[in-house]
Amino acid sequence: MNGVNKTGNVLHTIKGLILKPEVSSFLIFIVMFIITATLQENFFAIKSTVRNINSFTPLILLAMGQAVVIVSGGLDLSSGAALSLFTCILTTVMKKNDPITGVYALLITFAVAILVGAVNGIGIGYLRIPPVIVTFATSYMWLGIALFLRPTPGGESVDWFRAFYKIDAVENAPAFLKAMGNFVPPALILLIIGCVLWYIISKTRTGRYIYAVGSNIESAYVSGINTAKTQMLACIINAVFIFLAALFFVGQNQSGDARMGGPLTLKSIAAVVVGGISLSGGRGSIYFALIGALILSFVNKIIFFANIPNAYQTLVSGIIIIVAIAGPAYVMFSKEQR
């Protein structure tokens, strides 16, 4: 009987682990990773790894920022438009033959990012307008400003800004930096900055308050938490992550585009859900938004390397994403039914 009981306890423990959204997402990630590594030749080669990191980075950064807002009880439908706006500001301020303008562009765009986050946060936190309405409206504001600055893709970028994408593309860059860039791509450094940023925030009262407000805003308010300020700070943190993604895009393309960020908005939300983070707020790890973004990125890789005809790529992509989302969603539903 003791043996049966022990077996039952082990199975119960395993079932409990699988029912955790984070574990479910991680298992899906492993499956996607294995399939992609099998289909893509030289997947583990340094050049392939660097290319993959570069292609995954923008969605990962947007998903992590989106996760902060969602955990706080909000939602950001303007993240893609904000990304486009930041690339347009950067390439408008910078003048190709004047390196110092790159510094001005960084400072001005960062200040605009804080303002963008504050505007969303004021609408959500202080005015108590539903997040979907606020960010849907501001998405058109950011798009309008971006189109005013850059009606067509283009603009200028200083040479050293390439360092945010590929260090050895920068003229007169030190040899040791170029060598380091072959093994540690700038995109990975941006991701590390994002992860460290959230780690520091998570250890502060702001990080704890974000979860508390998202879990139950009324209880958080009664407990003495400034819920409006907390939601605004969550939106500002999100804007900083978007700013990091904009640096990568401009470093890669050397131009700005008022419409390039649009498709990434819904993908960032999907990545958060795939990462096992509850859309109702207050639950989930911000780092698992990274896992969710990787899963969605692997979907595109699998479709490409499997040589699926273009006519079926959208259908297959949708099916894979639904399966990936269904896992964490089923887990959350099972937990709520207990």
Image (tube, rainbow, N blue to C red):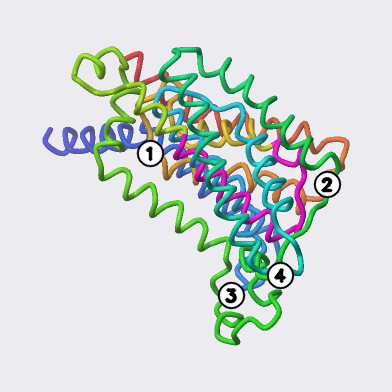
Quarter of the image holding residue 47?
bottom right
CA neighbours of label 2 inside 10 A, class few (<14), some (14 to 19), many (20+): some
Q: Position of residue 82 (x, y in %)?
A: 63, 37
Find the residue positioned furthest to the bottom.
175
Which residue is pictured at 77% across the width and 50% down the height?
304
Check disc 1 and report its element: helix, strand or loop. loop
Residue 105: mark = none
Residue 153: mark = 2
Q: Position of residue 235 (x, y in %)?
A: 47, 32
Per the image, the residue denoted by label 3 is: 181
Q: Earlier in the sequence, mark 1 or mark 2?
A: 2
Per the image, the residue denoted by label 1 is: 285
Q: CA distance from mark 1 to mark 2?
A: 36 Å
CA neighbours of label 3 inside 10 A, class few (<14), some (14 to 19), many (20+): many
Q: Classify the position of the C terminus by image quarter.
A: top left
Q: Nearer the viewer, residue 126 or 295?
A: 126
Check disc 2 and report its element: helix, strand or loop. loop
Q: Nearer the viewer, residue 327 or 281?
A: 281
Check disc 4 and report its element: helix, strand or loop. helix
Tell me the kind of residue under disc 1. Answer: Ser
Quarter of the image holding residue 3?
top left
Which residue is pictured at 38% across the width and 47% down the height?
198
Tell me the kind of residue under disc 4. Answer: Asp
Q: CA distance from mark 2 to mark 3?
A: 28 Å
Per the image, the residue denoted by label 4 is: 159
Q: Earlier in the sequence, mark 4 or mark 2?
A: 2
Q: CA distance from mark 3 to mark 4?
A: 16 Å
Q: Are marks 3 and 4 in contact (CB under 8 Å)?
A: no
Q: Main secondary structure of the magenta part?
A: helix
Which residues fall within the magenta stretch?
A: 236-263
Q: CA distance from mark 3 to mark 1?
A: 30 Å
